[in-house]
Image (tube, rainbow, N blue to C red):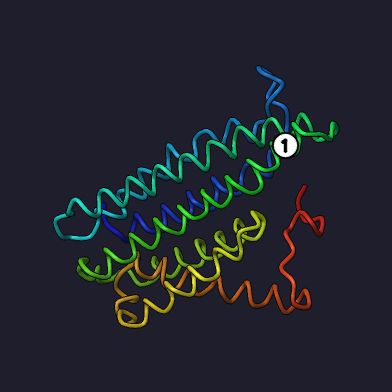
Amino acid sequence: MRAAVLAPAFAVAFLVLFLAPPLLPYRFDPYPLINWADVVDLATPVILIPLYWLLLVNAEAPIGLGWVIAFLILASAWVEGHGIHLAANAIGHLLKDQPGPAFDLTEFWDELFSHYVWHFAVLGLSGLIFLRTARAAKPDAGTKWTGWAAAAVYGFAVFLITDEGGTALLAIPVALAIVMATWPVRRRLLTSPVLAMFGAGYGLTLVLYAAWFVYWGGKLPQFSEIGLIK
């Protein structure tokens, strides 16, 4: 699949699948103990992990065993973190009015452990794909706008999910590292949608975090803390 199509398709899928669940807090009538958010979220790894793989192998060079092993480790962590989050979050909704050890445990698995494992893998997979593309991909000429469009969508999405997920202290250093790694290949951002999506996308993430930090007087509040989402 051409990067001109794959990069924006991934960015849009990433945004929609990460942001749809918080907007669907409605009971799932066939099984009322869960919400529509939980049902939709079941599709997240099924759709995104194959797209990550397609991005990795899109570079026009043979893929070595080391790349495959790194991908499998990060993809496994991605799915594990997501699965823990999905289950603990669904149970936590039933316990939110019953404070106690059970609720505290679901909060730990959902809001702390799973978010860090999941978002570490999200950032790690993007870094892996960026590195392989920078080393091996040939320029995909004539696709300038698709890369920048994908960067805008992806960078905005990463800011939203890591801020609300409480993983800004993880996301900001990784974003900065990828932006710094972009400098040697900066001219290829105009011809490689994948490099643009991650290189420029993480640049946008940093800009948004900087603006958020200044606006809130040196703090990075989660959106739910200020009432923007429930």
Rendered residue at 38%/63% (across/down): 127
Q: Position of residue 210 (x, y in %)?
A: 64, 77
Question: Which percent across, then down, holds residue 102?
Answer: 74, 31
The crowding category of the residue bearing disc 1, from other C-alpha atoms within 10 Å (few below 14, some 14 to 19, many at least 20), is: some
Does 182 sit above or below residue 12? below
Closer to us: 200 or 190:
200
Q: Could you tell me the amino acid type at mark 1?
A: Pro
Residue nearer the viewer, 160 or 104: 104
Query: Who's the residue at 61% across and 32% down the image?
Result: 87
Give the residue pinned by disc 1: 25
Q: How many marks?
A: 1
The reply, left or right, for residue 163 in relation to residue 73 is right
**On the image, which quarter does residue 29 sit in?**
top right
Tell whether 192 sits left or right of 100. left
Q: Position of residue 13 (x, y in %)?
A: 48, 49
Residue sitting farthest toward the left: 62
User: Taking 202 as reference, is 73 left or right?
Assistant: left
Q: Is residue 216 left or right of residue 11?
A: right
Helix, strand or loop at label 1? It is loop
Residue found at x 32% / y 45%: 72
Q: Position of residue 46 (x, y in %)?
A: 43, 36
Q: What residue is rendered at 71% in x and 21% in y?
A: 32
Against 202, residue 83 (above or below) is above
Outermost residue, front side = 101
